[in-house]
Amino acid sequence: GENVEQHPSTLSVQEGDSAVIKCTYSDSASNYFPWYKQELGKGPQLIIDIRSNVGEKKDQRIAVTLNKTAKHFSLHITETQPEDSAVYFCAASIENNFNKFYFGSGTKLNVKP
Amino acid sequence: NAGVTQTPKFRVLKTGQSMTLLCAQDMNHEYMYWYRQDPGMGLRLIHYSVGEGTTAKGEVPDGYNVSRLKKQNFLLGLESAAPSQTSVYFCASGTVNTGELFFGEGSRLTVL
């Protein structure tokens, strides 16, 4: 099955700095890569996703990049704010066959004011 | 709009006891999932369902059973709880169209 690895496990940045979280996947059939944000005491919530037919996607301060050849994708958060502090998960799946999502182990992001 | 609701939110069991976690969604989603979340291990899929009356095993199904008798409900059962099942359990639902998963707020289970 798919194996998704995520780094780093913890990340501490100063408010206003950028944060980058990286994931790798093993199954070349995977073509859908979402990112989820989990705030304390809550369930994860989708913040952005990317499909394998594009290399980059942006949504305000958040961007995701995908390198299919190297089988890795990254989440970029610019101008970080304290409310960005949370646990972030990457995942991989196969579009139109969402039987299984394989999640990374999570990154705890701490944005210091 | 309630989304995905899990009950109970907290439960303490003794080894060998049984219990059922209930997940309900009001979005008419076809897919439903049960995950467990453990420190440093992310979210691991226990069982999932692609429609009413169907269930399938995920990555870590041992010690759990599930049922989906109604489209909106997905039940996770522990027949004989073990300390290794101490975890936070999340239910999620989704559609084949978008791929977005909607998670409940989690159920924290402690097995003594």
Image (cartoon, rainbow, N blue to C red):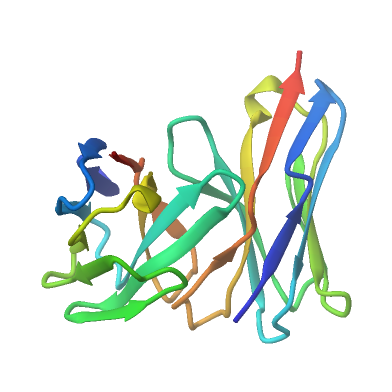
Q: Residue pushed farthest top?
A: A113
Q: Residue at x 52, y 69 (%)?
A: A101
Residue B25 visible to an observer of this rendering = no
Residue B102 sits in which quadrant? bottom left
Quadrant where the C terminus of chain A lies? Answer: top right
Q: Nearer the viewer, residue B17 or A98?
A: B17
Q: Is residue A4 left or right of residue A47?
A: right
Note whether B55 is above or below B37 in the view shown: below
Is B48 left, or right, of B53 in this rendering?
A: right
Q: Nearer the viewer, residue A28 or B82?
A: B82
Horizontal and vertical percent position of residue B28:
24, 65
Drawn side of residue B103 relative to residue A54, left or right: left
Measured from the top left, where is residue A5 in percent x and y?
72, 62
Residue ID at (20%, 40%): B8
The answer to whether residue A12 is above or below residue A1 is above
Q: Quadrant of the N terminus of chain A?
A: bottom right
Q: Classify B11 as above or below B4.
A: above
Query: Horizontal and vertical percent for residue A27?
Result: 69, 82
Looking at the image, residue A62 lies above or below residue B25 = above
**View extreme (left): residue:** B69
Query: Residue A56 lies in what quarter of the image?
Result: bottom right
Q: Tell me if residue A2 can be seen.
A: yes
Residue at horizontal 36 percent and vertical 78 percent from the top: B57
**Residue A33, how many percent across, how many down?**
65, 66
Q: Which image quadrant for residue A107? A: top right
